[in-house]
Amino acid sequence: MVARSIRNVVLQFDRLADALPSGKRLSDGMSAAVAVADTLWLTHDETVAIERLSAERTSAASFRYAAHRRFDLRDLISLPVPGRKSERAPPPEADLEGISFCGDYLWVAGSHSALRDRPGKKTGSQAIAALANVRRSGNRFLLARIPVATAGAQPTLVRQLRAKDGRLLRAARLAGGRKHDALTRALRDDPHLGPFLSIPSKDNGFDIEGLAAAPDGRLFLGLRGPVIDGWACILEIHVAAGLNRRNELMLRTIARSPASAAPRTLYRKHFLDLGGSGIRDLCCAGRDLLILTGPPMRGKGESQVRRWKDALASNTEKILSKKQLTKMLDLPSRAKKDQAEGITIVVRQGRRLWLMVIYDSVGKGRRVPPAGMRATLHELSLPP
């Protein structure tokens, strides 16, 4: 793949909805995005909501995303820690870091990570004590699917929907509680990932930051951390609605590897040589996976987009060298501003595609007052 051109596109949020209770703004940067036709669905890592923007033509050769609407996840699924909507205090954040669309459902994933307190304005022993405090917030352990209704003028997220073929589509999340879910329970004894579940994400701990959904409930989860001896990891799981009264999603068993001592498992691990980088996002491009890389911990590091060819054709665990992961894009990397955080394909025509990159902690050059930000569109060319 070869990058051919780059352009900016404005993401315009509603001015009244832009400000968040934490003091931050949506337009400061989003955590994940997926484009579906003319609609852009986005998440912010300090909310429990999904944002919808719609493409609008601004001139003969330009467009933006606007007509902002917010969907509170508490109206669609039961959160581990829902809080009370009547109270001023918002519910604990879900740290939403992944969003994807497949078939009839929009999928979202929280980071599933532990959180270390920051010293803030504390000094001396109080600041040191704060650094030792590690918490696990229930809403971070969220993996859910939401039906998308398309009968109206704009697509809408709903609790349930009767499809044209008679199927009943229902919003549901992976079974779990305040401290864990079915995925982290399955990983507790894993020799690679189990030891990192209680380590905070910014310390190379377990941290989901990418989600790509494929048919039949097949999900790829990109891990920002841990990066193990320079190797990044993509988890693959298959989920389906269970038979319990809550209609929760359950993990399905899948084949691991013909040579494995345990041929059946609840997840597969794929290890990728990304030169010490972690994974910041994933998206499907046909049978391929596009991978946004970035530093696993705080600070400056390389940010690239790489391609795992025929990833969806794989049915065993993989270990992939750098040569097997074609580099598509080099993205600017700064320590504190304009961090590439999400990717999604906006348009694909044959071997050409336009890839949107969204950013977190945007600098002045990406701000569009009063409540907008600039993402970038990259035209890419697939080899014959």
Image (cartoon, grey):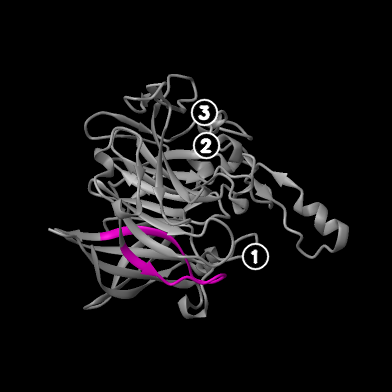
Badge 2 amino acid: His
Pointer 1 or 3: first along the chain:
1
Q: Residue at (39%, 25%) from the top-left corner? A: 252
The residue singled out by tag 1 in the image is: 23
**Contact (Cβ within 8 Å) of mark 2 with mark 3:** no
Quadrant (top left, top right, bottom left, bottom right) of the C terminus: bottom left
Quadrant (top left, top right, bottom left, bottom right) of the N terminus: bottom left
CA–CA distance in space, label 1 to label 3: 36 Å
User: Please, what is the dominant secondary structure of the magenta stretch?
Assistant: strand
Image quadrant assignment for residue 64: bottom left
Number of residues whose C-alpha sits closer than 10 Å to that of mark 1, classed few (under 14), some (14–19) or many (20 or more) = few
Q: Bounds of the magenta span?
A: 328-346
Q: Which mark is residue 186?
A: 3
Residue 355 at x, y percent in the picture: 30, 63
Q: Residue at (29%, 33%) from the top-left corner? A: 315
Pointer 2 or 3: first along the chain:
3
CA–CA distance in space, label 2 to label 1: 37 Å
Image quadrant assignment for residue 306: bottom left
> Please, is residue 43 above or below residue 170 in the view?
below
Residue 3 at x, y percent in the picture: 26, 69
Q: Is residue 45 magenta?
A: no
User: Does 58 sit left or right of 298 as displayed?
Assistant: left
User: Does 143 sit left or right of 56 as displayed?
Assistant: right
Number of residues whose C-alpha sits closer than 10 Å to that of mark 3, classed few (under 14), some (14–19) or many (20 or more) = some
CA–CA distance in space, label 2 to label 3: 12 Å
The residue singled out by tag 2 in the image is: 192
Disc 2 vs disc 1: which is toward the camera? 2
> Please, is residue 288 above or below residue 219 in the view?
below
Residue 358 at x, y percent in the picture: 42, 64
> Please, is residue 200 above or below residue 4 in the view?
above
Number of residues whose C-alpha sits closer than 10 Å to that of mark 2, classed few (under 14), some (14–19) or many (20 or more) = few
